[in-house]
Image (tube, grey):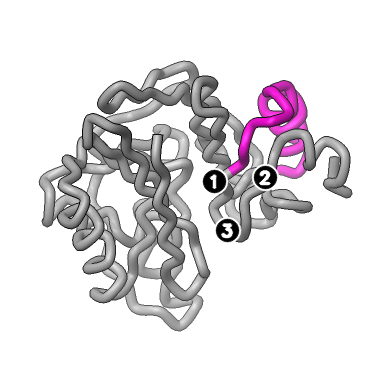
Amino acid sequence: MEIKTFLVNPFQQNTYLVYDQTKEAILIDCGCFSKAEQNLVVQFIDDNKLVLKRLINTHLHLDHQFGNKFIFEKYGIKAEANVEDEFLLKSVSSQAASFGIKAEDAIPLGAYINEGDVIKFGDSSFVAIHVPGHCPGHLAFYSAESKALFAGDVLFRGSIGRTDLPKGDYATLIKSITEKLLVLPEDTVVYSGHGPTSTIGYEKVNNPYL
């Protein structure tokens, strides 16, 4: 499994394009905001002759889904996320305005992802893990075979997600991380929504919040 990271938008968000030897690919948290950022993703897909199959979201805060409409218009693929985060789609433009950013309203989801769902592409797959706390519908995507965890904004290198946004809850977040993520193998690589990668083993020992 190959992972291409795009650092995008004013929030310095990590957009992940994941693919394997079959050339089938999925996008995780497409936060592309500018035309230049969108072009980088398209160019990489074209240059590597990839076939984009799905667009999935760990959660629906605006910086993680700026590019969802662009992907639909370019590839005809709608985003998938947990239903409990769907309320965030109604206020993208107003959220953006509060940061001095102009953004278009979001388009509806194409499908819902629930705890335990398997996201398949090519010869690869992820299992969806429900990890609320940063927001109620937050998901993480885990591949045991590739030892990879796409953690969104739940777990960062040396830190955790903020809980002061709508429907965030600190106790719930800590419970999610402890019971759902820290039980994974210690050599699992954590790909976060912002910042560098980490491992479960590193966070168990070094994260001051845990």
Q: Which quadrant does the C terminus fall into?
A: top right
At horizontal 18% and vertical 56% (from top left) the residue drawn is: 47
Residue type at mark 3: give it: His
Instruction: Say whether residue 100 is left or right of residue 38.
Output: right
Local crowd at mark 1 within 10 Å, few (<14), some, or many (≥20)?
many
For marks 3 and 2, the one nearer the N-term is 2
The residue wearing badge 2 is 155
Can residue 109 be found in the magenta stretch?
no
The residue wearing badge 1 is 152
Q: Which residues are magenta?
A: 169-190
Calculate the distance from the C-alpha at mark 2 to the C-alpha at mark 1: 7 Å
Residue type at mark 2: give it: Leu
Foreground residue among 96 and 178: 178
The residue wearing badge 3 is 194
Image height of 203 relative to 33, above or below:
above
Q: Secondary structure at mark 3?
A: loop
Q: Position of residue 56 (x, y in %)?
A: 35, 39
